[in-house]
């Protein structure tokens, strides 16, 4: 389930937008990034929970099933790499916003 949600769905979403225009590599980098998917707070929460929930389950049941610990390590490594690929290749950068300071730390 994690690879489908993290990699395949965003890849198909951006790929369909590019295919619909019938022009590849003719746009500048900012124009290409404007067509990419927005990475919102719900996406961040989903990615965080995809990593946190298996960790919690292994911490509860790791003594009963010791083979789950190396499996969690493998799963976590794959999850982090797929999230990184999605953020770099499928999601656009946030637009800069002018601020007066650094927030509550002033």
Image (cartoon, rainbow, N blue to C red):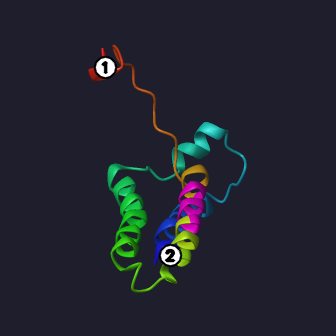
Q: Quadrant of the C terminus?
A: top left
- Residue 93 shows in this picture: yes
Classify residue 17 by image quadrant.
Answer: bottom right
**Residue lying farthest to the front in this orientation:** 63
* Nearer to us: label 2 or label 1: 2
The residue that appears at 46% across and 70% down in the rendered structure is 5
Q: Which of these two is toward me, 81 or 65?
A: 65
Q: Is residue 16 above or below residue 67?
A: above
- Spot occupied by residue 87 in the image (x, y as percentages of width and height): 54, 52
Query: Do labels 2 and 1 touch, CB within 8 Å?
Result: no
Classify residue 58 by image quadrant.
Answer: bottom left
The magenta stretch spans residue 82: yes
The residue that appears at 33% across and 75% down in the rendered structure is 60
Q: Is residue 88 above or below residue 4?
A: above
The magenta stretch spans residue 53: no
- Spot occupied by residue 69 in the image (x, y as percentages of width and height): 50, 75
- Residue 20 shows in this picture: no
Q: Secondary structure at mark 1?
A: helix
Mark 2 or mark 1: name the one nearer the start of the chain: 2
Packing grade of label 1 (10 A; few <14, some 14-19, many >=20) is few
The residue that appears at 52% across and 84% down in the rendered structure is 67
Residue where numbered disc 2 is placed: 69
Numbered label attached to residue 105: 1
Q: Which of these two is toward me, 5 or 51?
A: 51
- Spot occupied by residue 74 in the image (x, y as percentages of width and height): 58, 72
Label 2 and label 1: CA atoms lie apart by 39 Å
- Spot occupied by residue 18 in the image (x, y as percentages of width and height): 60, 58
The residue that appears at 59% across and 41% down in the rendered structure is 31
Q: Secondary structure at mark 2?
A: helix
Residue stretch rendered in magenta on the structure? 77-85
Numbered label attached to residue 76: none
């Amino acid at each position: 389930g994690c690879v489908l949600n993290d990699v395949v769905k965003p890849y198909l979403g951006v790929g369909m937008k590019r295919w619909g225009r019938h022009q590849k590599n003719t746009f500048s980098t900012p124009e290409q990034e404007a067509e990419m998917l927005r990475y919102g707070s719900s996406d961040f929460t989903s990615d965080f929970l995809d990593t946190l929930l298996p960790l919690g389950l292994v911490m509860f049941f790791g003594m009963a099933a010791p083979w789950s610990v190396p499996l969690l390590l493998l799963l976590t490594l794959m999850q982090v790499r797929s999230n990184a690929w999605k953020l770099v290749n499928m999601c656009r950068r946030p637009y800069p916003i002018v601020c007066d300071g650094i927030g509550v730390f002033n």
